[in-house]
Image: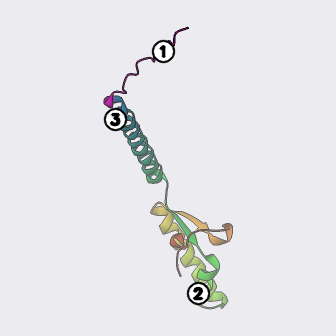
Amino acid sequence: MSDATIAQPATKPIPYGLLLGVPLAAVVLLGAWSYRTTSQLEHALAVRPPIAVVPLEQLLTAHGQDQSNVEQQAVRVRALAQRLKDNGYIVIDDRSLYAYPRAVEVRP
């Protein structure tokens, strides 16, 4: 028997265009997806009204516990809440919330 050599199939080199094209296409698609997601988020934030958290007890007792002071403060707090509402804010009493960032709190 003779030693016959098995012919190896010829391998074709991978074209450089394919090596560069696939990662480049992935980067372009990722960038487009990121841009679209960011613009959707910006739009969603733009149409949501801002929130103001009112620490009601602090505002009512800011000038003492006297009943007349508390009643005067209650009138001021209602007026403040109305002004905030008129300017597009959602006004929430802090007793209704479990947690919130201090940046949205109305300070006495």
Where, by quadrant of the figure, is residue 40 drawn? top left
Numbered disc in front, either 1 or 2:
1
Report if residue 15 lies within the magenta region. yes
The residue pinned by badge 1 equals 5
Q: Residue at x 48, y 68 (%)?
A: 83
**Label 2 crowding class (10 Å Cα cut-off): few <14, some 14-19, many 20+?**
few
Q: Is residue 14 above or below residue 70?
A: above
Q: Which residue is mark 3?
A: 20
Instruction: Indicate which label's residue lies in the foreground, 1 or 3.
Output: 1
Q: What residue do we see at 52% from left, 67% from top?
A: 82
What predominant SS class does the magenta segment belong to?
loop
Mark 1: which amino acid? Answer: Thr
* Residue 105 drawn at (x, y percent): 54, 73
Query: Quick check: 94 left or right of 26?
Result: right
User: At x 58% / y 90%, what residue is drawn?
Assistant: 63
Q: Helix, strand, or loop for circle 3?
A: helix
Residue 20 falls in which quadrant of the image? Answer: top left
The segment highlighted magenta reads 1-17
Determine which residue is flagged by label 2: 62
Pointer 3 local density, CA inside 10 Å: few below 14, some 14–19, many at least 20: few
Q: CA distance from mark 1 to mark 2?
A: 98 Å
Amino acid at pointer 2: Ala
Q: Earlier in the sequence, mark 2 or mark 3?
A: 3
Q: Amino acid at mark 3?
A: Leu
